[in-house]
Image (spheres, rainbow, N blue to C red):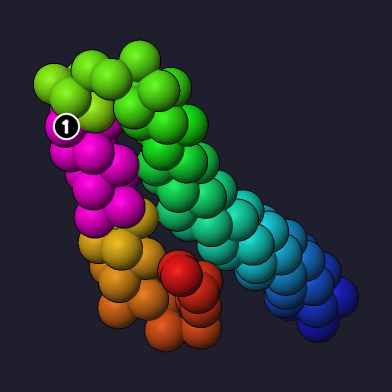
Amino acid sequence: MKFIYLVNRIHWLRARAQRQRWHEELILVVHEMEWTVRYYLHQSAVWKDRRKVVFQMDDSGAAAYASRKIEMWRKMAFASSNSFTKAYPMFKFPIT
């Protein structure tokens, strides 16, 4: 009887530890999803700053390239945010 109790106790402790690890992993993944979207938005802002500089230099080719990069990074932010929301509906990251 004691042996079965001991086995059940060990199994319960291992299951609890695994549940705690999965809970921690979920927290990390949600943060990584947010960091990904924030990184894409940051890159968009970086290219906006670069576009301002080339506008001042009156370089329309570089400004057009910067505009394409801004749009590329914003699309990536929207796409990743939408994908993350589909995969984990509790993920909400407002993109303005």
Specify whether 13 is left or right of 65. Answer: right
Amino acid type at mark 1: Ala
For the residue pair 32 and 51, the one nearer the viewer reads as 51
Magenta stretch: includes residue 72: yes
Look at mark 1 in the image and give the residue it sits on.
Answer: 64
Q: What SS does tag 1 mark?
A: helix
For the residue pair 5 and 88, the one nearer the viewer reads as 88
Bounds of the magenta span? 64-76
Residue 85 image point, x, y percent: 37, 76
For the residue pair 25 and 7, the one nearer the viewer reads as 25
Q: Report which quarter residue 65 is drawn in.
A: top left
Looking at the image, is 61 positioned above or below residue 4?
above
Question: Residue drawn at (34%, 27%), measured in percent from left and top?
Answer: 55
Residue 14 appears in view: no
Residue 41 appears in view: yes
Specify whether 7 is left or right of 39. Answer: right
Magenta stretch: includes residue 5: no
Split into 4 quadrants, where in the image is the N terminus? bottom right
Residue 8 image point, x, y percent: 72, 75
Looking at the image, is 91 positioned above or below residue 68?
below
Residue 42 image point, x, y percent: 50, 41
Q: Residues within 10 Å of mark 1 (few under 14, many from 20)?
A: some
Question: Residue drawn at (53%, 57%), measured in percent from left and top?
Answer: 34
Residue 70 image point, x, y percent: 30, 42
Looking at the image, is 59 positioned above or below residue 32?
above
Q: Main secondary structure of the magenta part?
A: helix
Question: Residue drawn at (30%, 78%), measured in percent from left and top?
Answer: 86
